[in-house]
Structure formats: structure tokens, C-alpha cells
Image: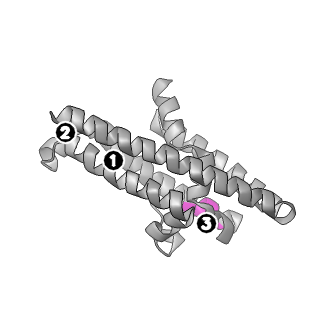
Amino acid sequence: MKSLALFLVLFNPFLMSIYLLDLIQDLDYRTFFRVLVRATLISASVFMLFAWGGEAIFTNLLQVRFAAFLVFGGIVISLIALQMMFTGSNAIRNMRGGDPEHISGSIAMSLALTVMMLMILKRAFDTIKVRNAALLERYIDITGRAAALLTGSIGVQMIMQGLQHGF
């Protein structure tokens, strides 16, 4: 249960709706679902590989101490959070690049729950955007800033853990 809760926090569908806002706005429901399922399968494969291989992948295969990955990953995530804080949801669009068909991004259960919640949020977005555009815009702004704070905190935590394990 503790692992499931951690993954649900990391894959928070409300924050993911901000990360995927351009896709939610630009793609029809069917295309969005297809892209989301494809990205989830790719992500699940990578997550499962690292859940199975763990630190040995870094140490033996990549020949990098896990602490170094934590520090560098924390720096990258912190920079992304700063970009999100100052430029909003466009930061994710700029990092991801153009074609949404090539999006890639207990693990299987949390991914499945996230996909279901995002599809519900997509349906709600399509309904709400017509009648309450100003309210939706405020939600996007507030949630985007909250996402930046959470993302930055995770980045700093990674740096701290990496420094702690490195010494």
C-alpha cells in the first residue's frame, strides 16, 4: 500500500493533466487515449526494468554510482520545476517537442489508475472549457504552480539523498 501511495503521488493525474495540457486541448478523445496508452506501456516497461534491476543497472551496467544519478536527476528536475514556475504549462510542451504520437514517457496498478483519471479529466475538460473558460484557466494556473513546487521539492530531495549516500 505504501508503494502504491507513493506512485499515485508521483503519477498524480491532476498534476499530469497540467503536464499534458497541450495534448488534452489539441487531440480528440480517441487520439488522446491512444497516445496515453502507448506512453503508459513504454513507461511501465522502463519502470519494471528498473524495479527489477534496481541499483545494479547503475552500478554494474552504466558504471555510475546511484548517488550521482540522484544528484544529477535532482538538478534536472529542479530546473524543470523552475521553468514550470516561471513559464507555466508551456515548459512541458517545449521539453517534449512536437509530435504527440511519439510521447513516451504495485507500478502497473498506479499507471492504470492514472490513465483512468486522466481520461475522466479529459472528458471533464472538454465539457467545462465551453462554459467556464475563465475558471478552467485559473485551475490550470494554480495547479501548474503547485506542480512546480512539488516537482522542485522532489528534485531537491533527490539531491539531498544523493549527497547523503555519496559520502
Q: Which mark is residue 167?
A: none
Q: Nearer the viewer, residue 81 or 12?
A: 81
Q: Which residue is mark 3?
A: 23
Q: Which residue is mark 1?
A: 74
Judged from the image, the secondary structure of the residue bearing numbered disc 2 is helix
Instruction: Check contact, mark 2 vs mark 3: CB within 8 A.
Output: no
Camera-nearest label, 3 or 1: 1
Give the class, few, some or many, for how many residues have Cα within 10 Å of label 3's Cα (few <14, many ≥20).
Answer: many
- Visible residue check, residue 166: yes
Residue 151 picture location, percent across and down: 47, 47
Which residue appears at 61% of the width and 67% of the height? Answer: 22
Amino acid type of the residue tagged 3 in the rendering: Leu
Which residue appears at 52% of the width and 44% of the height? Answer: 11
Residue 26 picture location, percent across and down: 66, 71
Camera-nearest label, 2 or 3: 3
CA–CA distance between discs 2 and 1?
Answer: 20 Å
- Visible residue check, residue 54: no
N-terminal label among 2 and 1: 2
CA–CA distance between discs 3 and 1?
Answer: 26 Å
Amino acid type of the residue tagged 2 in the rendering: Ala
Prevalent SS, magenta region: helix
N-terminal label among 2 and 3: 3
Judged from the image, the secondary structure of the residue bearing numbered disc 3 is helix
Q: Which residue is mark 2?
A: 56
The span shown in magenta is 31-35
User: Outermost residue, bottom direction?
Assistant: 98
Locate residue 114: give its quadrant: top right
Amino acid type of the residue tagged 1 in the rendering: Gly
Which residue appears at 30% of the width and 42% of the height? Answer: 159
Instruction: Check contact, mark 2 vs mark 1: CB within 8 A.
Output: no
Residue 81 picture location, percent across and down: 46, 54
Relative placement, left or right, of 148 versus 124 is left
